[in-house]
Image (cartoon, grey):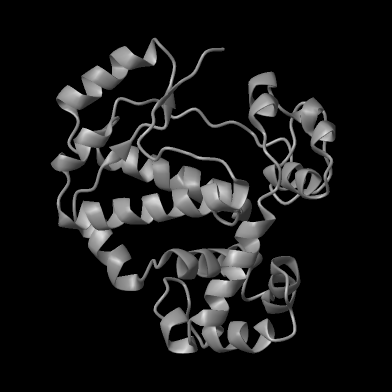
C-alpha cells in the first residue's frame, strides 16, 4: 500500500468484505458511491444491547429461549418474523458429518491441512454442534471456518462446484422487495447481465452450472423448512410492507 496503514482495516471479516466490495466497484468503474459506516459493536460480542447488537448475541438469546429480550435490538418488523432456534438443523448438520467419510469432507471448500480428520475424530465424543465447534476451533482454525465446512458438507457444496460457479454466469434471486422496489426490479431484468429470478418460470433462463447452484439453494430451503416445521416456497418473492 506504499505506507503505514491500520492493521484492523484488513484483519476483521466485515472490513475485508467492505474492501472486496470497494475493489469490485473500482474494477467496474461503477458510479455507486462508497459510504463506510463505523461498526458500533464487535461482530463476536455476545451481550445484547439496546439499538445495535451483534447477530451472534441475538442468535444466542433466541437459542436460550429469550426471544423477548431481543426486542430492544431489532426493528419491529424483524422481531415480528423471528422464529425459534432451528436446533434440528444442527443435528442434521452433525448427522451429515457422521455419514460422510473423511475423504468426502476433504472435498469441501476451505477444508485443508487434514481438518477433515480432526472433525471426524472429535465427532465421536461431541454430540452437539456447539460442543464440536468448541473442540475443533483453534487459533489457526476459526469457528466461522469450521461452520462453513460443516454447512458445505451438509449441502453437498464441493470445491469443483465452487470453481465452476465462479467461472460461469449464475443468477440473482430476489427474496423480498417493497412496492417501490418492483420498478427497480423491472429495470434490472431489462439491463442486468445475469438472469433475475422472481418466479418459477424464470428457471428456464438458467444454464447447467447455474441450475446446479440453484439446486443447492432448494436443498438449503427444504432443510430449513424441515427443521422449523414451516413450509417455505423457494420461488416466493415477498412483497414487504413497512
Q: Position of residue 31 (x, y in %)?
A: 30, 25
Q: Is residue 188 above or below residue 147?
A: above
Q: Is residue 77 above or below residue 102?
A: above
Q: Residue at x 14, y 51 (%)?
A: 207
Q: Is residue 113 above or below residue 178?
A: below
Does 121 sit left or right of 127 as displayed? Answer: left
Q: Position of residue 46 (x, y in %)?
A: 80, 49
Q: Quadrant of the C terminus?
A: top right
Q: Position of residue 179 (x, y in %)?
A: 40, 11
Q: Position of residue 152 (x, y in %)?
A: 46, 66
The quarter of the displayed image where residue 48 is located: top right
Does 59 sit left or right of 66 as displayed? Answer: left
Does 197 sit left or right of 152 as displayed? Answer: left
Q: Nearer the viewer, residue 77 or 74?
A: 77
Q: Residue at x 45, y 53 (%)?
A: 220
Q: Nearer the viewer, residue 215 or 57?
A: 215
Q: Residue at x 39, y 40 (%)?
A: 234
* Residue 193 visible in the current orientation: yes
Q: Residue at x 30, y 30 (%)?
A: 198
Does 127 sit left or right of 38 as displayed? Answer: right
The quarter of the displayed image where residue 159 is located: bottom left
Q: Nearer the viewer, residue 211 or 58?
A: 211
**Tag count in the figure?**
0
Q: Nearer the viewer, residue 218 or 20?
A: 218
Q: Quadrant of the N terminus?
A: bottom left
* Residue 195 visible in the current orientation: no
Amino acid at each position: 500500500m506504499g505506507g503505514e496503514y491500520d492493521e484492523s482495516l484488513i484483519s476483521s471479516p466485515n472490513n475485508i468484505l467492505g474492501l472486496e466490495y470497494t475493489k469490485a466497484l473500482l474494477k467496474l468503474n461503477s458510479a455507486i458511491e462508497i459510504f463506510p459506516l463505523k461498526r458500533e459493536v464487535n461482530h463476536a460480542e455476545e451481550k445484547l444491547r439496546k439499538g445495535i447488537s451483534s447477530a451472534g448475541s441475538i442468535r444466542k438469546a433466541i437459542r436460550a429461549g429469550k426471544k423477548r429480550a431481543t426486542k430492544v435490538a431489532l426493528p419491529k418488523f424483524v422481531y415480528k418474523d423471528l422464529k425459534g432456534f432451528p436446533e434440528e438443523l444442527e443435528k442434521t448438520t452433525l448427522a451429515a458429518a457422521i455419514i460422510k467419510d473423511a475423504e468426502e469432507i476433504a472435498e469441501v471448500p476451505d477444508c485443508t491441512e487434514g481438518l477433515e480428520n480432526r472433525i471426524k475424530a472429535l465427532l465421536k465424543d461431541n454430540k452437539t454442534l456447539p460442543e464440536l465447534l468448541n473442540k475443533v476451533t483453534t487459533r489457526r482454525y476459526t469457528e466461522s471456518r469450521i461452520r462453513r465446512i460443516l454447512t458445505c458438507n451438509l449441502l453437498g457444496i464441493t470445491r469443483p462446484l465452487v470453481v465452476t460457479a465462479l467461472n460461469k454466469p449464475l443468477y440473482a434471486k430476489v427474496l423480498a422487495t417493497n412496492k417501490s422496489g418492483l420498478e427497480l426490479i423491472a429495470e434490472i431484468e431489462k439491463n442486468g447481465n445475469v438472469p433475475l429470478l422472481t418466479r418459477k418460470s424464470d428457471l428456464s433462463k438458467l444454464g447447467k452450472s447455474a441450475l446446479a447452484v440453484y439446486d443447492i439453494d432448494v436443498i438449503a430451503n427444504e432443510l430449513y423448512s424441515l427443521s422449523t416445521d414451516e413450509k417455505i416456497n423457494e420461488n416466493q418473492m415477498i412483497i414487504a410492507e413497512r
